[in-house]
Image: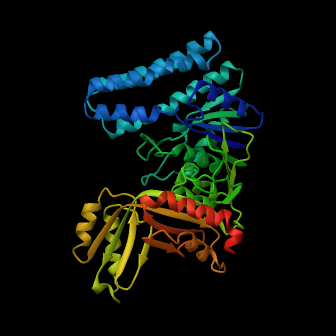
Amino acid sequence: MRVLKFGGTSVGKPERMHSVAKLISSPDPKVVVLSAVSGTTNALVDISTKLCKKDIKAAEDAIEKLFTPYHAFVEELYTTEAGKYKGHAIMRTYYELIKSYVTAPSFGDKETRFFLAQGELISTNLFQEYLAEQGYSSALLPALEFMKTDADSEPMLEYIEEKLNEQLAKHPNKQLYITQGYVCLNSDGEVDNLKRGGSDYTATLIGAALRMEEIQIWTDIDGMHNNDPRIVKRTFPIPEISFDEAAELAYFGAKILHPTCIRPAQVRKVPVRLLNTMQPEQKGTVINSKPSDRDITAIAAKDDITAIKIKSSRMLQAHGFLRKVFEIFENYKTSVDMITTSEVAVSLTIDDAKNLEQIVKELKEFSIVEVDTDQTIICIVGNFGKEKTGISKRLFDAMETIPVRMISYGGSASNISILINSTLKNETLNALNERLFFQAETVK
């Protein structure tokens, strides 16, 4: 059994849904996870924001703007009058549901989370009706019946496994199942979500829970590339990559995969394959447990980084200094990406500057603090075991003319991170790409 996830662009137009139906038409058993139609979640966020502010007229206008294009969507999706009637009935139900909140006495976080779940509910109901119209035998599995997170917002894998098997048992004669990505119940039993990119997470959780043969993530890109194709001219898809490498790339900027989604598949050793709905014949990228035999696999970039240098003469041979520093970041729930230390200073980076002012204020009570904004982390991923030689030379040869703010090497056997000013990002990615992938023999 496999799980196939299709993102917002893959179901964003009626013809795309038609293509998805063809892709899943083989008789082998599968669970299909769908995102909301592209643009729907953003529209629901906008409506929620306006309702929170009690801007009723603007909210009503936003609701009309969201639902009006769905009329044409339904007309193009279905081929029979009966199908179109059912499609319009689905949209009318969700329109009336969303519109009913305009007159609600209050609207807050709970209602917003409920709203954000409606996009996936709309897309899966429309798609299920299309499959029925076309003669497919499929079952709709409500994600809210099996997808749940605990008090720390972490998915409950054993619970998911138990409840998902219960749902499957209700449809013993089916081989094709449709469900929603992204949505879940939280520990209070309220409608919630797995955050942005969470449909990938849904797919890997289902694949891990059922110990499936393979998890397929279908997007509009032909697999994971060795570099950012929007910036770098000569890139290529990576046929195979390890879980550790993929996790590093996802965290440090590779947009094709949600950073947290790899973990369930890695724990239960279920391969993840990245495929392109526009070019289904392409092999894509397989992520699995097999260690990479390449020195360097790929490069990614993470923007909007803030670098903080904390200096204190009292740090010399003083125990407890780092504990004191990191307690401040912990108190403000701010994660640290990179860190380097010397005898009298520590430099680190954060990607969330929301509490920067308060953090700096507390750090200044016992140290001198310097802050650099508009920084970018360049992450080079590969097999950097301690027995490897020559990799650092190749790297620094490529960076010869580019000023470097920080370097992190040794914390992971598969990641070297370099911090630069964001204005140098494009130059750096292209220089590294040419030197590391296309001049490797010359460098050696």
Identity of the residue drawn at 54% across and 58% down: 300
Tell me where residue 379 appears, x and y as whole percent. 53, 64
Identity of the residue drawn at 67% across and 52% down: 237
- What colouring style does the render use? rainbow
Instruction: Residue at the far right: name it.
Output: 27
Tell me where residue 249 appears, x and y as whole percent. 56, 59
Tell me where residue 114 appears, x and y as whole percent. 41, 35
Identity of the residue drawn at 59% across and 65% down: 381
Identity of the residue drawn at 55% across and 74% down: 396
Say left or right for 56 vs 153: left
Residue 386, picture quadrant: bottom right
Query: Is residue 174 visible in the rendered structure shown here?
Result: no
Q: Does residue 100 lie above or below 117 as drawn?
A: above
Along the line of sight, which residue is nearer the eye, 97 or 171?
Answer: 97
Q: Quadrant of the N terminus?
A: top right
Q: Does residue 428 lie above or below 211 as drawn?
A: below
Q: Quadrant of the C terminus?
A: bottom right
Say left or right for 91 vs 366: right
Residue 75, picture quadrant: top right
Along the line of sight, which residue is nearer the eye, 422 or 292?
Answer: 422
Instruction: Residue at the far bottom: name it.
Output: 317
